[in-house]
Image: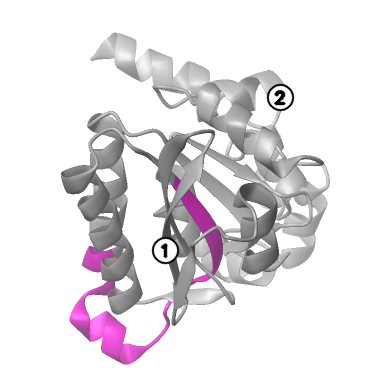
Amino acid sequence: MDWQTLATRLFGADHGITRDGDCLRGEVEFDGQPLTVIGTTDHAPIGVQLALVQARAVLDTIAQHPGRAILLLIDTQGQQLRRRDELLGINRAMAHLGMCIDLARRRGHRVIGLVYDQALSGGFITSGLIADACDALPEAEIRVMRLPAMARVTKLPEALLAQLSESNPVFAPGVGNYVAMGGVRRLWQGDLAQALREALADAPTEDRRAEDGAARGGRRLAASVVQRVLDAA
């Protein structure tokens, strides 16, 4: 689904969200309450400039509108693979974006991520996976690493990884597998405005991804290992 159609279904034809390059930004009214919308489109690669633009939008909301909810619209192919961005410190820029989102959460802003098209790699990790909760449209595409790349990194045969992906969602791309692992809380279907209403109403105040993954059978050990580490601290 393109961002204009999504925005119209969520907020009506006069939604007020604008596009500047690959960045989306707007302040909308939803159920009589103001909401900040920040996002990307056209499978945007997240480079230094785009990461800092989004971080600035988050910090502006914290400074100018304390407590206002934030909706992150996510469509990214991951980090910008360009020498210029590497030299400028893309790792620090993306970390800054993630820290700004975390700061908003700590200051009482409800932050909801919505993967409406594509979410890959670091562009997803430093946005939707840092939000209070990340939801997705059923047709969205989500993955952190393709199996061929995973094979190169792990030195395991791609055929073995493909076999493992059939029974273990950790090895497999796809929105359904991220729901099973707890990375995606729920899928939005039907009335998208109602789905947003429910997402804002029951946004968790602490990270429940490991617990959700255990309950859904996608990450059976993460929650218990985390708890053992906390108990030993």
Q: Residue shown at 28%/28% (left/top)? A: 108
Between 100 and 172, the one nearer to me in the picture: 100
Dot 1 surroundings within 10 Å: few (below 14), some, or many (20 or more)? many
- Residue 90 colored magenta? yes
Q: Are marks 2 and 1 in contact (CB under 8 Å)?
A: no
Q: Which residue type does callout 1 highlight?
A: Arg
In the rendered image, the residue lying farthest to the left is 63
State the quadrant of the N terminus.
Answer: bottom right
Q: Is residue 193 above or below residue 13?
A: above
Q: Which mark is residue 95?
A: none
Give the structural element (helix, strand or loop) at label 2: helix
Q: Residue shown at 29%/77% (left/top)? A: 49
Question: Which circle's residue, 2 or 1, is located before the other in the chain?
Answer: 1
Q: Position of residue 121 (x, y in %)?
A: 51, 62
Q: Quadrant of residue 184?
A: top right
Between 22 and 208, the one nearer to me in the picture: 22
Q: Quadrant of residue 105?
A: top left
Along the horizontal axis of the image, is 40 left or right of 34?
A: right
Residue 118 in view of the camera: yes
Magenta span of residues: 71-93
Residue 142 in view of the camera: no
Q: CA gap, disc 2 to disc 1?
A: 34 Å
Q: Which mark is residue 216?
A: 2
Q: Residue shown at 78%/58% (left/top)? A: 162
Q: How many marks?
A: 2
Q: Which residue type does callout 2 highlight?
A: Arg
The residue where tag 1 is placed is 25
Between 29 and 10, the one nearer to me in the picture: 29
- Residue 10 colored magenta? no
Dot 2 surroundings within 10 Å: few (below 14), some, or many (20 or more)? some
